[in-house]
């Protein structure tokens, strides 16, 4: 269900930006902390995209690693979702620098010029 609602949001965003043009590719940045299953998201994206300008578009998922900063000693480190303690001082007060991204970075749309090249 998680991936279904994300897929629906991604299609929504892409359709809005495409402004009626057919979408060929959607580039999505996904933070590691979102714990999105890429295969599952791709599946639901394809499902929701049916009968929209996104139908048949590829979904490119760029995984953004999680980086945290300790608020006590300012150490920064790359973390997986399960390690939220500072490796230097053991502090649990941390700031998330990256890893919570979930954004459509760009979309690629079909233009009339490109379509005539294919034909
Ligand atoms: Zn620390």
Image (cartoon, grey):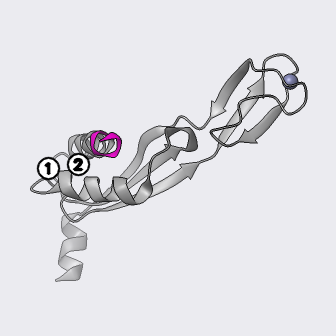
Quarter that holds the C terminus: bottom left
Q: How crowded is mark 2: few (under 14 residues within 10 Å), some or many (20 or more)?
A: some
Whether residue 70 appears in this view of the structure is yes
91 or 21: which is nearer to us? 91
User: Which residue is painted at 77% across and 28% down in the image?
Assistant: 85
Q: In this view, does 95 lie to the left or right of 112?
A: right
| Number of marks in picture | 2
- Read off the residue under disc 2: 18
User: Which residue is painted at 71% across and 40% down in the image?
Assistant: 79
Callout 1: SS: loop
Q: Position of residue 90 (x, y in %)?
A: 85, 25
- Is residue 3 a member of the stretch shown in magenta? yes
Q: Do the residues labelled 2 and 1 touch (CB within 8 Å)?
A: yes
Callout 2: SS: helix
Label 2 near ligand 1 (CB < 8 Å)? no
Q: Is residue 80 left or right of residue 2?
A: right
Per the rendered image, the range of residues in magenta is 1-5
User: Which residue is painted at 34% across and 58% down in the image?
Assistant: 42
Q: Is residue 118 left or right of residue 50?
A: right
- Image quadrant of residue 89? top right
- Is residue 98 a member of the stretch shown in magenta? no
Residue that sits furthest to the left in the current view? 51
- Read off the residue under disc 1: 20
Q: Where is residue 14 in the image (x, y as percent from the top left)?
A: 27, 46
115 or 24: which is nearer to us? 24
Q: Position of residue 43 (x, y in %)?
A: 29, 59
């Amino acid at each position: 269900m998680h991936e279904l609602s994300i897929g629906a949001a991604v299609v929504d965003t892409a359709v809005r930006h495409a402004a009626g043009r057919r979408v060929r590719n959607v580039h999505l940045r996904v933070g590691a902390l979102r714990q999105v299953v890429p295969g599952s998201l791709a599946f639901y994206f394809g499902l929701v995209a049916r009968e929209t300008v996104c139908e048949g578009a590829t979904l490119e998922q760029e995984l953004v690693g999680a980086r945290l900063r300790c608020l006590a000693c300012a150490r920064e480190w790359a973390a997986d979702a399960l390690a939220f303690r500072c490796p230097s001082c053991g502090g649990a007060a941390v700031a998330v620098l990256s890893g919570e991204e979930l954004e459509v970075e760009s979309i690629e749309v079909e233009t009339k010029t490109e379509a005539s090249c294919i034909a």
